[in-house]
Amino acid sequence: MDEQFILRVPPSVAERINRLLSENASSSEDKSLDLEFSEDGRTGTFVIGNDRFPASVLDLPCVVESYKTYDDSALVKTADVGQMILVRESGEASPDVVEYRHGLTPPMRDARKRRFRREPDLNPELVQRVEKDLVNIMSGGTVENLDADVNGQGDENARNVNKKAPPAAAAAKPEVPDTGGNAGEPDGSDSDDSDDSM
């Protein structure tokens, strides 16, 4: 498969690129097109003619498939596109994030916030301790640091584990007459098993 990316440019630059790629490119004053990146690999410069524009490489929120055709009827997948080069006007601020917030089409606007689950807030120390305990258990050992303080009850739970609750005294229940709600019929269920319509 090819390596591909999305090149998103301002409208004025897009017109110049169209002229450069069109048939009458020899008459265009923009004869060169170049893309240079700095050492970090995320920022760079887009050069067209004598003008330089700042550019950034951003990760797309989801993978986009790219296709091409030779006979206008059969499509052949050529690549999975996961990054976009965003060319900005000279005065615009550079994005401070690595991942682009939106997708490529209007339905994917603000895709990261609307379509994907938030990452859970986990304590890294807790995750490492649980991983260590799981490895211990899988190797036939036991949990080293058993925390009884799960729900804030702590030592009370640890002391009361072996104690049985005393049986409740038989309290006199008030007699309630049976209303005969279903009159001997079995309890109904809402499951699909009771559906006889098929």
Image: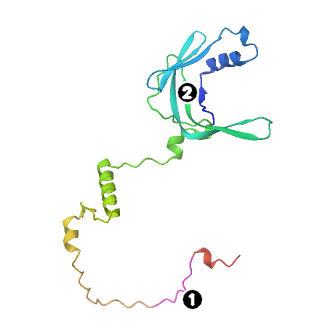
Specify whether 131 is left or right of 81: left
**Relative to the observer, which residue lies in front, 180 or 110?**
110
Picture coordinates of residue 121, whole percent (x, y): 37, 48
Give the quarter of the image for residue 22.
Answer: top right
Specify whether 11 is left or right of 111: right
Picture coordinates of residue 184, whole percent (x, y): 55, 91
Picture coordinates of residue 14, whole percent (x, y): 64, 20
Between the C-alphas of marks 2 and 1, the distance is 69 Å
Reading the image, the residue beneath label 2 is 85
At horizontal 51% and vertical 31% (from top left) the residue drawn is 58
- Give the residue type at disc 2: Ile
At horizontal 35% and vertical 63% (from top left) the residue drawn is 138
Residue range (magenta): 178-189
Reading the image, the residue beneath label 1 is 185
Q: Is residue 74 above or below residue 164?
A: above
- Give the residue type at disc 1: Glu
Tag 2 secondary structure: strand
- Assess disc 1: are there few (<14), some (14-19) or many (≥20) residues with their C-alpha within 10 Å of its C-alpha: few
Decide which of tag 2 and tag 1 comes sooner along the chain.
2
Q: Nearer the viewer, mark 2 or mark 1?
A: 2
- Residue 185 lies in magenta, yes or no? yes
